Structure formats: C-alpha cells, structure tokens
Amino acid sequence: MKKQYRIGFCVSGKGRLMQSAILNASLIGVEGAKVILDTNSDPEIVTFCSQHNVKYTKLKSPSEEKFHREINEQCLDADLDLLILTFDRIIPISLINNFNGKIINVHPSLLPSFKGTNALNKAANKGVRFAGATIHEIDEHIDSGAIISQCIIPIQKGENAESMGKRLFPYLRSMYLQTIHWYATDRIFTDDLGRIWVKDAVYGEMPISPALELTIPNRR
C-alpha cells in the first residue's frame, strides 16, 4: 500500500499558504498534515484546522531554548515526509539535520538578494525593478539553502511593500502548491553541485520557474 504523504506546516501570521495547501490537498498529493503554530499566529487558524480536521499545536514559549525543544518534539514525533516553513523563527540545527533535505522555506525575495526579515521593504527601498519570492531548502544559514522555485513581478513606480505583496501573492500561492506536488510525487533531485532540480520540469518561463504544471483553482 502506498504510504500517505504527510506534511508539517510551521506557521507564523495568518497562514494563508498553509490553508490553501490543505484546501487543495487532493490536487497536490497530500494525504496528511500537521500544523505547528507560532506564538504570534492568527487565532483564526485554530478554527480553520478544527473545521478541516487537521491536527495542530500552538507553541507556548517565546524563549529560544524552550522553543527549540517544543518544535523538535512536535515535528519529530509526527512522521512527516516534508516540513514547510512560513515562519518568523530560526529553527534549530538539530531539526534541520533530522529532516535531511526535506525541510523548505518560503522567502519573499528573489534570493540570494534581500535575505532576512522585511525583504519586500528592502526591495522597495533599494529601487530594484523586479521583486519576487523563492522557495528554497533550509540549511544551517539564513536564507542560503538551494533554490527550488522562484516567481517574479515587475515593480511599479511609487509602489511599497504592501502593494508588492498583494500582487505577488497569487503567483507565490500557485508556485507553493506546485512545489509541494513535485515533492509529493518524488520529482525533486540534487545535482553534484548541490543545486536542486525538478525532474522533467520546464525552466526559464515567466513569471514562475519551473513552470506550473497543475491547474490551480482560483480560490484561497
């Protein structure tokens, strides 16, 4: 019998991407999920998880030491195939090592540019002509792991981080769901230089590369 593909979602804020993945679980090949909520996550996520029978836990401690212990316990005991971060916290090295290439992050910039927090603000203030988002593998450094997929938008005159984020989100959402599907269908591989590729994917298309293959419903 085929093993269920189970994902853990570590979520700060509103969790819109996580909710979209759960609503589209059958499309992207996910059969089980657990949500780990940061202390600052939106309370409505608990209602969403309850309505959709998704297991969740909310981390209790803001201190780094206790946070590391909590998140290790929650993730390592959940039998997860992939861990996805939309998270404001730095996760412990022990967790990265235990997942061994199966932990990825969503970052709102075209890495390697604008690492760290407030990436869209940095892009707006720097006056670059394009902004974007990156999904990348996690390593021991901040926003430095191998890139999996990226999406891009042109920046309009007078634009700020908020307006950029609103225009970027639909592309990011589609890329996020597609990337999960590539992992769930075992199409991700790493070359001899440590770069990540998707087997049989089309590269070089705009505004998302690798190009979308799924037809993503126009919903949350």
Image (cartoon, grey):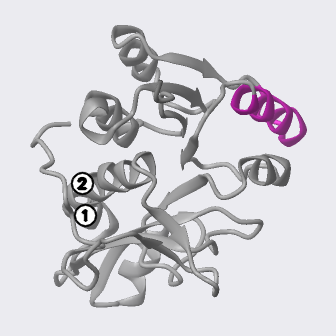
Which amino acid type corresponds to the residue marked 1 in the rendered image? Leu
Measured from the top left, where is residue 24 in percent x and y?
25, 33
Q: Secondary structure at mark 1?
A: helix
Q: Nearer the viewer, residue 104 or 92?
A: 104
Measured from the top left, where is residue 101 in percent x and y?
65, 58
> Is 67 included in the stretch rendered in magenta?
yes
Left or right relative to 107: residue 97: right
Q: Residues within 10 Å of mark 1 (few under 14, many from 20)?
A: some
The residue at the point 51 percent across, 29 percent down is 3
The residue at the point 42 percent across, 88 percent down is 126
Measured from the top left, where is residue 150 in percent x and y?
36, 72
> Is 45 included in the stretch rendered in magenta?
no
The residue at the point 80 percent across, 54 percent down is 97
Left or right relative to 2: residue 97: right
Front position among marks 2 and 1: 2
The residue at the point 58 percent across, 64 percent down is 137
Q: Nearer the viewer, residue 72 or 126?
A: 72
Which mark sits nearer the N-terminus, 2 or 1? 1
| Residue ID for mark 1 | 168
Q: Residues within 10 Å of mark 2 (few under 14, many from 20)?
A: many
Task: Specify start and end residues of the magenta stretch as a single range.
Answer: 61-76
Measured from the top left, where is residue 202 in percent x and y?
25, 76
Q: Secondary structure at mark 2?
A: helix
